Amino acid sequence: MYDIKAHLNEIRQSLPQGVRLVAVSKFHPEEDVLAAYEEGQRIFGESHEQELARKVKTLPADIEWHFIGHLQTNKVKYIAPFISMIEAVDSLKLLREIEKQAAKAERVVRVLLELHIAEEATKYGLTLDDCRQLLADGEWRQMKHVQICGLMMMASNIDDDAQISQEFQTAADFYHEVKQAYFADDPHFCERSWGMSDDYLLAVNHESTMVRVGTAIFGPRKY
Ligand SMILES: *Cc1c(COP(=O)(O)O)cnc(C)c1O
């Protein structure tokens, strides 16, 4: 049997203090989530709304669920009542819908803005200029039920550490730019979510505060 607990603990031990681990449990059954939970893991990441809704019903209530995938606006209402963080906000339209649904649920939902830095054309996310524009526009300041907590990104899915490191560093530099310009007095804006199974050790060298690791904990996904 694949030893989830051993892999989880190995990864934890390799992370510097202050870097949080999001255990990405998409396409893994509830019993795998529980195995990690029993080791004290509390933050889990999912990227499909229906799968998440199913797991939330049966798994312990003190799990902090992060939505890490591309979120369609028409799905926000399903997760707004319980989601701990929506990591991949890539448009003002989505941000507005989160505000609306979080208000209905009488909650404040924490979000990250997703950057598109990788070379792949298929990846979602805001270009750095889109992100600058969204923040300069200022509508987000009126949103009382959304808390922008930082940035998220995925590096290119390639076998080139130098390129991947450069992408993480671009994200880290951009974080400091917007922190200074918009969030200097806001301690909530502090998260840098980058690093996955293949590149989380590079990511923590480039100021990641949150790594999203699936395969390296749970093994290959069971589609
Ligand atoms: C699936 C996924 C991960 C985890 O990927 P692994 O390579 O299995 O660690 C991380 N981030 C996002 C956004 C994902 O969709």
Image: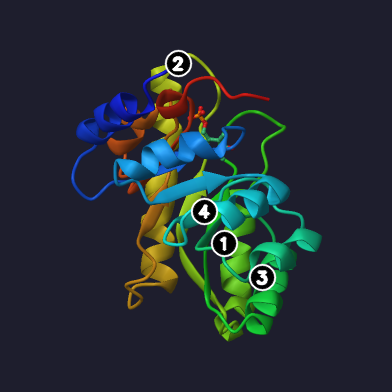
Tag 4 and tag 3, C-beta contact below 8 Å? no
**Which mark is first along the chain, 2 or 3?**
3
**Which mark is first along the chain, 2 or 1?**
1
What amino acid type is highlighted by mark number 4? His
Between circles 3 and 1, the one closer to the viewer is 3
- Give the percent coordinates (x, y) of residue 116: 60, 43
**Residue at coordinates 53% horizontally, 77% vertically from top-left?**
108
Q: CA distance from mark 1 to mark 2?
A: 28 Å
Between circles 4 and 1, the one closer to the viewer is 4
- Give the percent coordinates (x, y) of residue 149: 44, 65
Is 103 located above or below residue 22 in the figure? below
Residue 98 is labelled as 3
What amino acid type is highlighted by mark number 1? Arg
Q: CA distance from mark 4 to mark 3?
A: 14 Å
Between circles 1 and 2, the one closer to the viewer is 2
**Which mark is first along the chain, 1 or 3?**
3
Q: CA distance from mark 4 to mark 1?
A: 24 Å
Q: Give SS at disc 4.
A: strand
What amino acid type is highlighted by mark number 3? Ile
**Which mark is first along the chain, 3 or 4?**
4
Is 217 located above or below residue 30 in the figure? above
**Residue at coordinates 44% horizontally, 56% vertically from top-left?**
63
**Which mark is first along the chain, 1 or 4?**
4
Task: Name the image quarter holding the N terminus.
Answer: top left
Q: CA distance from mark 3 to mark 2?
A: 36 Å
